Amino acid sequence: MERLEILKTYKIFIGGQFPRTESGRYYTPLDKKGQPLANMCLSSRKDFRNAVVAARKAVGSWSEKTAFNRGQILYRIAEMLEGRKAQFVEELVKQGSTEAKAKQEVEVAIDRCVYYAGWCDKYQQVFSSVNPVASSHFNFSALEPMGVVGIIAPQANGLIGLVSTILPVIAGGNTCIVLASENLPLCAITFAEVLATSDLTGGVVNILTGTEKELVEQFHSHMDVNAVVYAGGNKEHALAIESGADCNVKRVFVYEHDFTKATDENPYYITDLQELKTTWHPIENVGGATSTY
Amino acid sequence: MTKKDKHKEKATFDFNGGWDYSPSPESTSHVKLKERYDLYIDGKFVAPNSGKYFQTTNPATEKVLAEVAQADESDVDKAVKAARKAYENVWSKLSAKERGKYIYRIARLMQEKARELAVVETLDAGKTIRESRDVDVPLACNHFFYYAGWADKLEYAFPNRTVSSLGVAGQIIPWNFPLLMAAWKIAPALAAGNTVVLKPAETTPLTAMLLAEIIHESGLPAGVVNILTGYGDTGAAIVNHPDINKIAFTGSTNVGKIIQKAVAGTGKKLTLELGGKSANIVFEDAPIDQAVEGIVNGIFFNQGHVCCAGSRLFVQESVAEEVIQKLKDRLDTLYVGDPLDKNTDIGAINSKEQLETIRKYIKIGKDEGANMYESSCEIPKKGYFVRPILFTDVAQSSRIAQEEIFGPVLTIQTFRTIDEVIQKANNSPYGLAAGVWTDKGSRIFNMTSKLRAGVIWANTYNKFDPTSPFGGYKESGFGREGGLQGLGAYLKIER
């Protein structure tokens, strides 16, 4: 007798848990042949707000982890992703990709995790400075995470855009709320399963599925979101975010590519979501001894 | 001779008597202000299209100093066209080395005219001559000197990226550090290869116009720097001009938000340096006398017209009584008065409007039930002056502890534990600066890493330097001015 396949229920990912949307609503994205892919959560404003609470709660513990430890956790994500490679390829194919393209997308995504894992304890050295002020002070500038970042992932692909927008944000110690591609959402939730098994603190990455149209306002109007990364490719939505960001002087970054190229990665995606803090302290200045003897 | 006798013998040192400084006013004889200042557009000083001028006054005497042109939209358009033309035809074609040499030349000319600049700054802004002379003007010169050297070294600033200039930069600056803010804006913009349209604040336009004269004298190609005086509508015309590539604004958070909305979707690069309500935190192990001086400097420097002013004082409970008493004693010794007098500690409030704002907040503080202590010092009868003020028993939710006053008004709160003070200090929509006073090194770094602010002063306060990036977190704005990082605001960094 033929075995009946167990179909996966795709839920959302908030605070390290997989709840259903509180709204009880769903939508059904279709594949290229017009067949339903799955019943996905149609996340609501309330889900978004819950995700922000979880993300804010996680900022302290995640940002204060050592850079080395963050690097290890990001590397762990690469390991988990590698282990589930076949599953991602299958999902991408199901969503309309060819086998070869899907394989490439997953491999680039895995390598990108390794790439940003490596940056965790390096970007600070590259982009910080000791500033030679003209007074008797020690003065240095170092990067710090902005805090809670809202991310709208590229619509054009299901995995690589998502991974490429999340990783630099969390590599830099931020936490985030991510809206997955509306029509290609399957990999986002499977990626959440990867994250859930990668020693990543719960709440560091929160993933919602649903429509950009409905949720875009939440991204720019929520007063506890510090920055928004918009990669959805819709000019109207980008404008809405930029013009709504003034409510709490959010930092907004609009990325116009889909991150498919292996070269679509650099540490400036990390530093975009960093604040620069400059610290001054007096240097004692007594006596005449110099350091030249 | 007993100790007591010794005191008797030196009875002339009567500290309770009339110890006072003789007046020591800076001479203004070498300063010859014109009666009228025009707009500086395309290398020429030209009258505004509207023919309208407005007066700028000395806030310490309420006397008119000069009248300045009121630029309207058509003047802004003319300036932007001049800046675009200069960018396309001259400035972007010049070698980086030559560009740098022009900026060095401006720095040197400013140094030569430092005394004149300082006196005019004091006359126009009401700030003390000590501060104009020792802080504002030298820092402004040094800013040009610092960024001049970056012009031909930009490829070292952003590793592994190609950088290029943006085009025309529109810059709007406030009245608290008029010349210094002009330098903070113009110097990096030019070093990065952009041309500039700058608007100084309406109450303090004079040093910007002197700077225009210096720039003119330097032989900088026409149109590279254009300076337009005017009110908020002039600023709005700059923000909304379609041929500007970059907006840099320093001023209030309210106006900053309007600008952020206005430039949305235009592709204009934006940096905002906005308001603050910075915490200054004193622990029980701090060197108390130094801390008291630091608190005074933190809030009363430049009459408290400082976006990063340490306006919220947090004192650990065990030393609160001592610190507050010493602060009160120190407050009574402050000299408030003629800004041109070298003895003066606190000068004039910049404008009548600002004086009214400060008075409004003083009333709010009293109405909210906080205890006010006002310095017993004398203040001049004419001019805009206010005595330095402390508020104790201030609630965290009090408006005077939450909103930026921009005047010599300090709120004092106490705390017991480190966690408590971190939470209280960070509980603000602002995040510009903070101060920490303690002798314990590990505590300094614990505090400096947990305070959410762009500039942290540990065992010091209100220090500035061209090499030191300045700017805020949260609603205090984004982008940095100063240092290598300050270049990023004026460059396109290829992805």
Image (cartoon, coloured by chain):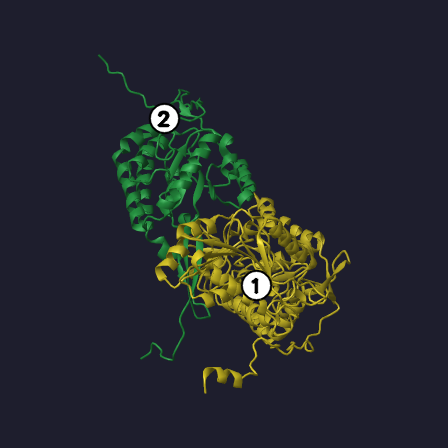
Q: Between marks 2 and 1, how big is the CA–CA gap? A: 59 Å
Q: In the rendered image of this protein, does residue B40 appear above or below residue B249?
A: below
Q: Residue at x 51, y 39 (%)?
A: A220
Q: Is mark 1 on a helix, strand or loop?
A: helix
Which chain letter goes with mark 1? B
Q: Which of marks 2 and 1 is in front?
A: 1
The image's mark for residue A10 is 2
Instruction: Pick out the residue farthest to the top.
Output: A1
**Horizontal side, residue B170 vs residue B46: left or right:** left
Asked if B441 appears above or below A60 in the picture, the reply is below
Q: Residue A45: which disc?
A: none
The location of residue B193, given as percent across then percent down, is 53, 60
Q: In which quarter of the image is the N terminus of chain B?
A: bottom left
Question: Quick one: A291 or B169, which is closer to the camera?
Answer: A291
Chain A: its colour in the image is green
Q: Nearer the viewer, residue A140 or A280?
A: A280
The reply to whether residue B233 is in sight is: yes
Horizontal arrangement in the rendering, residue B123 relative to residue A14 (left or right): right
Where residue A268 appears, x then y in whole percent? 41, 50
* Displayed quadrant of residue B340: bottom right
On the image, the x and y values in percent for residue B362 come to 62, 54
User: Chain B: what color?
Assistant: yellow
Please state which of residues A165 and B216 is positioned toward the viewer in this rendering.
A165
- The residue wearing badge 1 is B300
Query: Which residue occupies the foreground of this view, A280 or B68?
Result: A280
Disc 1 marks which amino acid? Phe
Q: Are marks 2 and 1 in contact (CB under 8 Å)?
A: no
Q: What element carries label 2?
A: loop
Q: Which residue lies furthest to the right in this view?
A: B51
Amino acid type, residue under disc 2 in the picture = Tyr
Instruction: Identify the chain of the residue marked 2, using the numbered disc in the image.
Output: A
